[in-house]
Image (cartoon, rainbow, N blue to C red):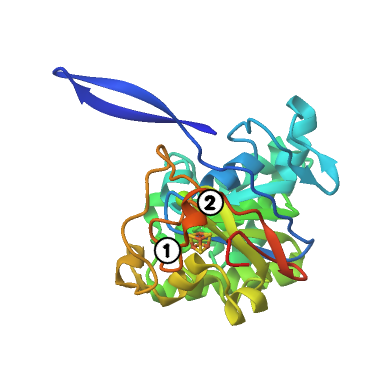
Amino acid sequence: KGILDKIKFKNGKFIKEERIVNAVNNISFSIDKGKVFSLVGESGCGKSTTARTIIKLIDPKGGNIRFDGKDITNLTGNEMLKYRKKMQMIFQDPYASLNPRQRVLDILTEPMLFHQVVSSKSEAMEKAFEILKKVGIRSEQATRYPHQFSGGQRQRIGIARALAVEPEFIIADEPVSALDVSIQAQILNLMMDLKEEYNFSYLFIAHDLSVVKHISDDLGVMYLGKIVEKGSKKHIFNNPLHPYTKALFSAVPKLSGTNLKNSKNVQGEIPSAINLPSGCYFHERCPYAKPICSKEMPIEKEVEKGHCVLCHQY
Ligand code: SF4
Ligand code: MG
């Protein structure tokens, strides 16, 4: 559950309104070491909330988060710092996540020194140049500021910053959604090359199945704060079971996001996360809905090994 802050105009005044939303509700998944797990779904389905909860930018109201077998849900201070170093995040909008007043070199050396992955400023600089080279930024560009780079280059810098502290796990929240298609491919290739080299694990967030097809080992499909289907890439792409997953496949990808309105496998609009439907959250839009669907939330079933679905049909 999360608090959603909204600015509302009421009685001639702007006021801040807080509403409680069920952003993510009773989900469970695991990511194997060195693998890519992708979370896919329309915007507002809770993908980013899930990511932010894992690195504890949001406090979960229940459940737990384990890293390397250790429960990190309630860690604080220095103990949590150790894990924050191991888990890094790459954001959708690199511009918003890079300090505009910092030179690229400082953007990289600061976290290295903070997390003590280097013992001196000169060692940090040396390492920063090495990483920049790996992500395709030339050393003479290292003294420039973020606004002097293109969107794709800024995302390279965002990736370099994540690499700077030698993470084991990277959360990439729609890292290519804001980029031109030609640049998207370059960034995805770079991310995969780096994974090969460093063997870290990814949680990759996307609204479009086609983006994650070639990079994922496993996937979870999210709808209104629930994982409605999860499994290996083969399960999801060769044998999609949940009506929502099928709808995502038949949707026409648009620059602004997956547009389910063009899909024949789904009807209506995504319901509000504040007034969740009864029963299966998808029932109002599902072409296969039966009477039970509006009454009871289905329970997760493992249909084949590692392939789970949340739907009364199974
Ligand atoms: Fe459709 Fe019912 Fe399955 Fe929900 S439980 S996805 S409404 S068939
Ligand atoms: Mg998001």
* Residue under numbered circle 1: 286
Please say if the residues under marks 1 and 2 sit with CB atoms less than 8 Å apart.
Answer: no
Q: Is residue 53 visible?
A: yes
Front residue of this view, candidates 9 and 149: 9
Q: Residue at x 41, y 27 (%)?
A: 19
Q: From this viewpoint, which residue is outermost toward the left?
A: 12
Of marks 1 and 2, which one's residue comes earlier in the chain?
A: 2
Indicate the amino acid at tag 1: Cys
Q: From this viewpoint, which residue is outermost toward the front?
A: 291
Secondary structure found at label 1: loop
Q: Which of labels 1 and 2 is toward the front?
A: 1
* Residue under numbered circle 2: 47
Indicate the amino acid at tag 2: Lys
Q: Is residue 35 left or right of residue 22?
A: right
User: Based on the displayed image, in which of its 4 quarters is residue 118 positioned?
Assistant: top right
Location of the N terminus by quadrant is: top right
For the residue with label 2, is its CB less than 8 Å from the closest atom of ligand 2?
Answer: yes
- C-alpha separation, residue under disc 1 versus residue under disc 2: 21 Å
Front residue of this view, candidates 103 and 227: 227
For the residue with label 1, is its CB less than 8 Å from the closest atom of ligand 1?
Answer: yes
